[in-house]
Image (cartoon, helix red, strand yellow):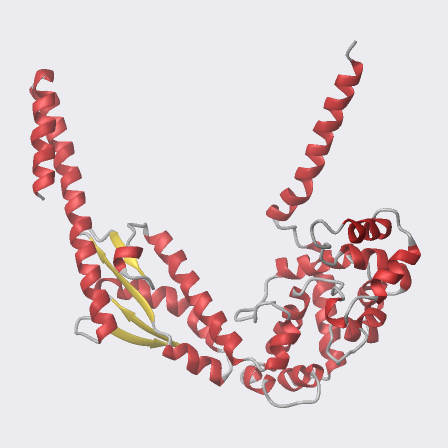
Amino acid sequence: MRRASLLVVLLASTSAAQGPDALAREAAHASARAQIAQHRFDAARTLERDWRASRDGGAGIATATIGAFTVRHSPTLSSLATTVVGARARAISSRLSAPAAARLARDTVRVLGARNPSGALVAFSTERYPREGVQPPRERAARARLEGVLTDKALSAARDGLTPELHDWLAGADYPIESVGARTARAVYETFALSPSRVAHECLRTGGPSCRTLLRVEPTTTPLRDWYTSGDYRGAIARTGDPAAGDSAAWATRLRCTKDGDAATCDALARALPAAGVPWPIAVDALRLLLDEALLAGGPGAADRLLAPAPTIGDQLAHASGLPIDTLVARWRTRVLAARGVPMDPNASVTFTTPLWMLLALSIGAMRRQGRP
């Protein structure tokens, strides 16, 4: 507050030559800025006090159980905590198994902060210590940040609750803590169009056994044979990792396949791939979409039934959904096909069109240079 007073005096001295009206305006502005600084200082001090209380179990911090979430919040942020968490907590909680929900309940969500006298949010922090995480956001930014914390904690709990077999089957795809949207289904549909695998194309065209093979609902030790024909090897090799830098012989061999289309080279490279190195023909979000369909069909208790021991992933999904695996896969395929009419993600369209515009610009530039004398 002392620095704010010095600021008022300094501004007043520099503005004296401008007349009494200008001096009054400058003084009013300086006073307003000093008041804002004081509000932020008081809020940060309150936030630090509340953080220590929430950590040590001190008084003044409310604790609420919302769905599977345990929330500790400042008195002035009770509405933000309950409305933002409550809007998603029950939907997320219904998707979690009992072990995952228990894990989530132990991982407290902190919603701490302070408001100025007018009620505006001045300081806000969720997980980090205030001295590292204090920011003066608007209410909308605070909501977005809190929703991100909820998502991260729920995904972490869901991953911890999966069996090793399900974790490996998802291949890095997120567990669907909320219903997967139509844009994700559209993105899965697009990967079929770009896939080099004829098995993938057959799955989308006719369904049946090719979809079961593609979705890995039954164990396989020969993924190259199951997912690709010999005519697909060029596209499969293009999806594998690049050779080591400086390995000119390996790069030359790879280019003979991917660039020149030499069938014998592609065949040799494909057959040399270990089973774990064979690229999956479509996006892993297809597996997330199938699991989402199983949870939707199964309703309450589906997440717990999913964890019951079973011979194959297909059996686990069938048990969770209450449907035969062929019926579940058919519903998944119908959902992918129904997404054809969903507009593309604007970010994806930028990704695809920008290189085309760059190529067009380079072509025009080259033609102009050729036309010069």
- How many numbered discs sit on the rendered protein? 0
**75 lies above or below 67:** above
Can you tell which quarter of the image residue 146 is in?
A: bottom left
**In the visual, does 51 lie left or right of 348?**
left
Q: Residue furthest top?
A: 373
Rendered-image quadrant of the N terminus: top left
**In the visual, does 116 lie left or right of 68?**
left
Give the residue displayed 72% in from the left and 56% down from the top. Answer: 190
**247 lies above or below 201:** above
Rendered location of residue 18, percent (x, y)? 11, 17
Give the residue displayed 43% in from the left and 61% down from the top. Answer: 148
**19 lies above or below 125:** above
**270 lies above or below 244:** below
The answer to whether any part of residue 293 appears in the image is no
**In the visual, does 287 lie left or right of 369?**
left
Give the residue displayed 11% in from the left and 39% down from the top. Answer: 4
Rendered location of residue 326, percent (x, y)? 76, 79
Rendered location of residue 184, percent (x, y)? 63, 60
Give the residue displayed 38% in from the left and 68% down from the top. Answer: 85
**In the visual, does 146 lie left or right of 315?**
left
Rendered-image quadrant of the C terminus: top right
Relative depth, front residue between 316 and 130: 130
Can you tell which quarter of the image residue 277 is in?
A: bottom right
The answer to whether any part of residue 145 appears in the image is yes
Rendered location of residue 31, percent (x, y)? 12, 36
